[in-house]
Image: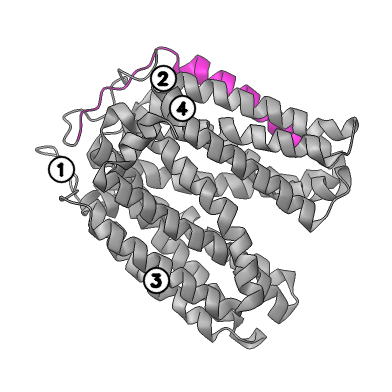
């Protein structure tokens, strides 16, 4: 691990936040795998599994910006502690799901968890800059990418194991414990972390909601970042829907091969997270995001067109491990750009809007894949997806060239509508 990462993990409050995230995300990934497996086992109906996914997605589409207003009103640490406790309680009703007739309980749990996450994620994004300072944003977000991928590597395997060994009840209790542990760790973070307000700033729910959208519309950096996030999320929606067909039809594989390639990408993401501190200290976030987005798309193009030459699995595993590196660095750069360009008092609203846009874009991508995969072929639709990253990255770098953010922390006088001043080199 790079020295810069080690120095961040030696900072008590950031380390508490990091380990809380790792523990709770591992539990999330575990339940994300165990729940659909168990629901399918009880009902034999893919429609019920799709219903669980819909219940997890719909709140993010319609409620995300509204949650952001409250995140900017309340203390971010207290929000995260409260939400973690509520998440622990929310998953416990899954112990009652033991037959097809009780599956609607799972719908309610999935919906409740999705609503709670709408408050937790923006609060975490807003809290992080307060704990580490602007100069280490890319390194800190690289570490967050690292724990995302560690959880992604361990959680699904644990979920399948728990579903087989102790059923959904055991998995739910385990997930509740991870949330409770995360709540304790976050509660140990020192200080108060409520955003300040500008003198004379308009208050009231609608005024605050509109103020968040005005901030985004008035900042070329934020508008560009959110646009790129939306475009790449469409690609992720295409990927999520078409990828199983790619493994089956192009690689002639099954569930085991699907698991291998996804694990390979998580390993690459871990490598990217480890490299993030060293690279982030040498490359500005704008350049980092531009280069990594283009690289991600080029490697995707290689992945999805390699079966035209060979259906061997090992080259795919290498490429998937490789693509995880720019994927992790791109994530870290985008998060750093949002945090470095957004006044603290608007941070929750900006992250909440990003969450809503991502969810909508993923659904659009999944719909496009459903419409066109069989018509034009799985390799072709995924090739278009990879090309979208390349074009999006190039346009992103060209449009934002020369923009730099100037946002002081934690209390700012800027509204964020002027051009940002310290991001690109």
Label 1 SS: loop
The answer to whether any part of residue 363 appears in the image is yes
Label drawn at residue 196: 1
Q: Is-magenta flag for residue 386?
A: yes
Measure the C-alpha gap from mark 2 to mark 1: 28 Å
Query: Which residue is depicted at the point 48% across and 35% down?
Result: 274
Residue 264: quarter of image:
top right
Upstream in sequence: badge 2 or badge 1: 1
- Between label 2 and label 1, give the one nearer the viewer: 2
Upstream in sequence: badge 2 or badge 3: 3
Q: In the rendered image, which residue does mark 3 sit on?
A: 88
Q: Which is the main secondary structure of the residues drawn in magenta?
A: helix
Measure the C-alpha gap from mark 3 to mark 4: 36 Å
The magenta region covers 382-409
Q: Position of residue 325 (x, y in %)?
A: 58, 32
Q: In this rendering, is residue 320 above or below 355?
A: above
Query: Which residue is depicted at the point 30% across and 59% down?
Result: 185
The answer to whether any part of residue 226 appears in the image is no
Upstream in sequence: badge 3 or badge 4: 3
Q: Is-magenta flag for residue 142?
A: no
Measure the C-alpha gap from mark 2 to mark 3: 39 Å
* CB atoms of marks 3 and 1 within 8 Å: no
Q: In this rendering, is residue 287 above or below 170?
A: above
Q: In the rendered image, which residue does mark 2 sit on?
A: 284
Q: Mark 1: few, some, or many residues within 10 Å (few <14, many ≥20)?
A: some
Give the side of residue 97 with respect to residue 375, left or right.
left
Label 2 SS: loop
């Amino acid at each position: 691990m790079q020295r810069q990462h080690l120095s961040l993990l030696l900072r008590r409050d950031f380390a508490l936040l990091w380990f809380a995230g790792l523990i709770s995300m591992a539990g999330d990934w575990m339940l994300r795998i165990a729940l659909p497996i168990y629901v399918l086992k009880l009902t034999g109906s893919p429609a019920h599994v799709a219903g669980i996914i819909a219940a997890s997605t719909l709140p993010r589409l319609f409620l995300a910006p509204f949650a952001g207003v409250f995140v900017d009103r309340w203390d971010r640490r207290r929000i995260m502690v409260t939400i973690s406790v509520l998440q622990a309680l929310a998953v416990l009703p899954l112990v009652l799901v033991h037959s097809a007739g009780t599956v609607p309980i799972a719908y309610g749990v999935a919906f409740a968890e999705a609503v709670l996450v709408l408050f937790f994620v923006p609060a975490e994004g807003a809290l992080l800059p307060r704990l580490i300072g602007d100069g280490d944003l890319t390194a800190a977000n690289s570490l967050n990418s690292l724990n995302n991928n560690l959880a992604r590597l361990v959680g699904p395997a644990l979920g399948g194991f728990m579903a087989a060994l102790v059923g959904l009840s055991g998995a739910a209790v385990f997930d509740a414990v991870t949330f409770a542990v995360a709540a304790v760790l976050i509660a140990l973070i020192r200080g108060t972390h409520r955003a300040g307000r500008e003198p004379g700033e308009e208050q009231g729910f609608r005024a605050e909601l509109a103020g968040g959208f005005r901030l985004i519309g008035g900042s070329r950096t934020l508008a560009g970042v959110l646009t790129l996030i939306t475009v790449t999320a469409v690609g992720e929606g295409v990927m999520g829907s078409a990828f199983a067909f790619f493994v089956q039809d192009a690689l002639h594989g099954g569930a085991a091969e699907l698991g291998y390639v996804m694990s390979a990408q998580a390993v690459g993401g871990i490598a990217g997270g480890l490299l993030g501190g060293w690279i982030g200290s040498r490359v500005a976030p704008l350049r980092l995001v531009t280069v990594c987005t283009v690289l991600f798309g080029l490697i995707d193009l290689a992945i999805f067109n390699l079966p035209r030459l060979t259906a061997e699995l090992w080259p795919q595993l290498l490429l998937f491990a490789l693509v995880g590196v720019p994927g992790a660095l791109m994530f870290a750069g985008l998060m750093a750009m949002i945090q470095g360009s957004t006044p603290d008092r608007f941070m929750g609203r900006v992250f909440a809007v990003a969450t809503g846009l991502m969810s909508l874009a993923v659904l659009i991508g999944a719909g496009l894949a459903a419409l066109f995969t069989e018509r034009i072929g799985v390799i072709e639709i995924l090739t278009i997806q990879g090309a979208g990253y390349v074009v999006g990255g190039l346009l992103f770098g060209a449009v934002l060239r020369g923009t730099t953010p100037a946002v002081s922390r934690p209390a700012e006088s800027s509204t964020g509508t002027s051009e940002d001043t310290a991001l690109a080199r």
